[in-house]
Image (cartoon, rainbow, N blue to C red):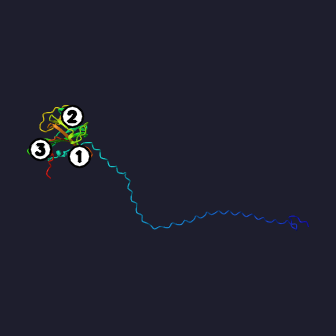
Amino acid sequence: MVKTKGKSPKGKAAPRKAVKAAKPAKAAKIAKPAKAPKIAKPTKLPAVAVKPAKPTKPSLPPPPAPALPPPQRDELAAPRDIARLTRYGERFGANRIDVRWPSIQLPIAAHAIALFDPGVPKSWRVLDRPVGTGQFKPMLSIARTDDGKEKLAALTIHTGRPPIARWTVAHHKGGKKPKSADQLPVISVTTGWLALVDGTDSPGPVALPAAQGITPVEVPLTDGRKVLALPCPNGEYTCYWAVDGADKPICLVVDFDVFTQKDWKTRPPA
């Protein structure tokens, strides 16, 4: 018997084997995210009381350096205790100081005081220490004896305020510094009058009435200045400055040299 391909022996067609359908591929598994590592919890520290911080003060700039005192002028120290001439009741031998305040004033606009004999223009002297400007009050120091006799002891022109630090000799502008008390600069008076005025320039001779006692007079000049003229004995007189701790002038004193060395040595009883 001839075998027929694909046919069964009985002549029937052989049944085909059923082809199994391919199983669908399983879906790829999605990788699960890795778990985050566990973080150890911090150990609790015991509670500590914290003091509130003090408010900080704002920083301040450093204090300024102390100001240096102004340099002192190169002036000779007063050889006498000139302050005694200005004290009411001060005793000089048989004389006692009395003070008087004239009603007139000395106007200064050029920052300097000049002194001269009004009848002698060549006696013109300007003091080299500036005093500022203003109306300065004069004060007379009168030496009185117990029997009532009077003589002019000093003239004081007040230009500032106390306290007084020291007394110096008043130097003349353009003059040489005196080296000792024997060479003090002086103002010469030969007509019985001493005049003080603003130190702008010399007014030349100034006519004055006859002197009466020790009362000062005021003389207006043609340039607007006013002269303070004081009757006094003829002689040569020295001026002195009282200055404060800042080297500013407090007053100018003209000593009319009416006391002897013995009078100056007199001191009030303790």
Tag 1 secondary structure: strand
Three-letter amino acid code at the position of disc 3: Arg
Comparing labels 1 and 3, the label whose residue is closer to the camera: 1
Q: Position of residue 110 (x, y in %)?
A: 25, 36
Mark number displayed over residue 124: 2
Mark number displayed over residue 144: 3
Q: Earlier in the sequence, mark 1 or mark 3?
A: 3
User: Residue 228: in sight, yes or no?
Assistant: no
- Tell which of 33 and 54 is nearer to you: 54
**Residue 26 vs residue 163: left or right?**
right
Q: Position of residue 263 (x, y in %)?
A: 14, 45
- Tell which of 226 and 255 is nearer to you: 255
> Gap in Å between the C-alphas at discs 1 and 3?
27 Å
Q: Circle 1 is placed at which residue position?
A: 166
Three-letter amino acid code at the position of disc 2: Trp
> Gap in Å between the C-alphas at discs 2 and 3?
31 Å
* Placement of 164 over or under 212, stated as above or below: below
